[in-house]
């Protein structure tokens, strides 16, 4: 999950009590990691990008507490556009979409400009997929000369931010750090850029120009958002526009020439209708219609009842609401899941334990008895962690991908548990050694077009003398405790392990797992300083059963 670090003063000065903050954050489905002096670190739910900034977070908390109420058309942009954005034909085949708006009377004094830039980077990393899908540029509106053009070309010049002279686009790339942006720009074959009547003001998604630099004293801004997805671009622009409106600034749209809409951002309130008994059936709790309306208001939604149906209006910054079920989830959050009592399951059948689950429990008990601590990780991970960081190659067709993943860090289902445990070690660098962790859980792969789920157990052992012999003894002892007396070992090759210090395990003639010493490059990738020995076994192969 992405985390955001905010100034505690920025939260308390907006009317949020420090003592009640952990409980309120938890009710919103997030976790307050720590309050460290003057800063607060919060693990934010990835489907709520509007909560990555202090204004959005405090708005959500105040709504939940009932201190403020949603207002109809508060975020509708009714003023006449100040700028026109023309879209050239050159961006059509590389980064075709742009949205923009102007801000008058912004307050960026004190630490507010830092908060804004931190929010920008968090949106880039999460919602914008590290700027590949979407990127944001802030400009001093008073330095914009004439209307704006969004185009792409192979050649051009700009004075990059932090420089005092105009250079070619190629030189701008070197100035910004060519390797960092090469993956994005290389596929374009040209440079998407935004310009006014006299100069290029940004190369998207790389860098802005020096002339339109934003400082604490800047009061008027032009905000441009470019990307490869119209929905992502418009959603990001809408979130930012709502942020400035809540801060008391005046926000005006830009007129778009050659784009998908005539005015951007499209700050639309989306309407959902449903019979209110549907909420009762879904949550298993009988709400009065008036209570549902109040609870919806607590999540920033406008609501009204007409006959037996409820109407909900979703504000532009709530880009996470895409169906009626999202609204029902909001109702449950506002009411409090802890207040909904579970109902007993009525049935006549008698259940029996799953044999593989019983075997998995035996594995857990054995490893706990051997001094290991159990870890519990999510099945969701990234290609980088599951494969690249452990030096393993993979067939992209065998990976189970998450459709419409909100972040790259949670984009696939894991094929192996071991990388998750290495990540746990990386997050516990300050803990005393030795560290011995294990996890029993599911792994996934695609074979012949079908998704297969397996059950594995993985172990990691980190300390200064961790080696092949130690992890071999651990595996042998585990199999002995489980009653597996006959098994074979043979030298194996796996890029995650040091060559010559890696072996595979066979049970009843079938490969059942692998163990060895982790390769130094893998340790470096996870920031680990001490040797690590690891093993991963397949429970179906060990016990001769299939997961259900």
Image: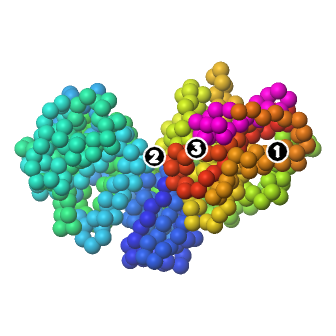
Q: Position of residue 376 (x, y in %)?
A: 68, 53
**Is there any visible trace of residue 291 in the rendered image?**
no
Q: CA distance from mark 2 to mark 1?
A: 61 Å
Looking at the rendered image, the disc whose residue lies closer to the viewer, 3 or 2, is: 3
Q: Residue at x 63, y 22 (%)?
A: 449
Any magenta on residue 497? yes
Image mark for residue 271: 2
Residue range highlighted in magenta: 492-512
Q: Disc 3 marks which residue?
A: 519
Is the residue 63 above or below the residue 160 in the image? below
Few, some or many residues within 10 Å of mark 1 (<14, 14–19, 20+): some
Q: Position of residue 113 (x, y in %)?
A: 28, 65
Few, some or many residues within 10 Å of mark 2 (<14, 14–19, 20+): some
Q: CA distance from mark 1 to mark 3?
A: 22 Å
Is the residue 445 above or below the residue 289 in the image? above
- Mark 1 or mark 3: which comes first in sequence? 1
Image mark for residue 541: none
Q: Disc 1 marks which residue?
A: 476
Secondary-structure class at tag 1: helix
């Amino acid at each position: 999950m992405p985390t955001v670090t905010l100034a505690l003063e920025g939260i308390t000065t907006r009317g949020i009590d420090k003592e009640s903050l952990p409980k309120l954050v938890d009710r919103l489905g997030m976790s307050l990691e720590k309050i460290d002096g003057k800063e607060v670190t919060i693990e934010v739910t990835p489907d709520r990008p509007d909560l990555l900034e202090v204004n959005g977070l405090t708005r959500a908390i105040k709504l939940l507490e009932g201190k403020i109420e949603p207002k109809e058309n508060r975020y509708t942009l009714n003023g006449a556009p100040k700028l026109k954005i023309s879209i050239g034909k050159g961006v059509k085949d590389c980064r075709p979409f742009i949205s923009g708006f102007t801000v008058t009377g912004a307050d960026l004094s004190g630490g507010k400009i830092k908060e804004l830039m931190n929010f920008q980077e968090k949106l880039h990393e999460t919602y914008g997929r590290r700027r590949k899908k979407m990127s944001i540029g802030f400009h001093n509106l008073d330095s914009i000369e004439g209307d704006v053009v969004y185009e792409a070309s192979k050649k051009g010049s700009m004075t990059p931010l932090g420089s005092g002279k105009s250079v070619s686009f190629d030189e701008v790339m070197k100035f910004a750090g060519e390797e960092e942006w090469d993956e994005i720009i290389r596929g374009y074959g040209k440079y998407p850029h935004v310009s006014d009547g006299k100069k290029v003001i940004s190369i998207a998604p790389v860098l802005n120009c020096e002339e339109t630099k934003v400082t604490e004293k800047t009061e008027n801004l032009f905000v441009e958002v470019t990307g490869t997805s119209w929905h992502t671009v418009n959603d990001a622009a809408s979130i930012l526009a709502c942020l400035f409106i809540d801060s008391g600034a005046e926000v005006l749209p830009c007129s778009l020439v050659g784009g998908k809409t005539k005015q951007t951002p499209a700050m639309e309130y989306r309407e959902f209708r449903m019979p209110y008994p549907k909420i009762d059936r879904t949550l298993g709790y009988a709400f009065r219609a008036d209570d549902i309306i109040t609870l919806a208001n607590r999540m920033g939604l406008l609501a009204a009842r007409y006959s037996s149906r409820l109407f909900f209006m979703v504000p532009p910054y709530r880009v996470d609401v895409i169906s009626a079920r999202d609204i029902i989830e909001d109702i449950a959050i506002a009411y409090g899941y802890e207040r909904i009592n579970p109902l007993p399951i009525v049935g006549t059948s008698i259940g029996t334990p799953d044999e593989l689950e019983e075997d998995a429990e035996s594995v857990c008990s054995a490893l706990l008895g051997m001094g290991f601590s159990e870890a519990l990780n999510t099945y969701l991970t990234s290609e980088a962690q599951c494969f690249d960081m452990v030096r393993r190659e993979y067939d992209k067709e065998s990976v189970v991908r998450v459709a419409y993943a909100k972040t790259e860090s949670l984009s696939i289902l894991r094929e192996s548990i071991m990388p998750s445990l290495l990540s746990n070690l990386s997050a516990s660098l300050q803990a005393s050694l030795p560290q011995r962790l294990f996890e029993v859980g599911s792994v996934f792969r695609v074979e012949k077009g079908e998704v297969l789920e397996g059950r594995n157990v993985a172990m990691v052992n980190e300390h200064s003398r961790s080696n092949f012999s130690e992890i071999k003894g651990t595996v042998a002892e585990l199999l002995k405790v489980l009653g597996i007396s006959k098994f074979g070992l043979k030298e194996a090759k796996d890029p995650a392990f040091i060559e010559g210090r890696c072996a595979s395990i066979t049970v009843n003639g079938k490969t059942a797992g692998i163990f060895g010493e982790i390769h130094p490059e893998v340790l470096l990738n996870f920031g680990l300083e001490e040797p690590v020995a690891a093993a991963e076994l397949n429970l179906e192969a060990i016990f001769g059963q299939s997961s259900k």
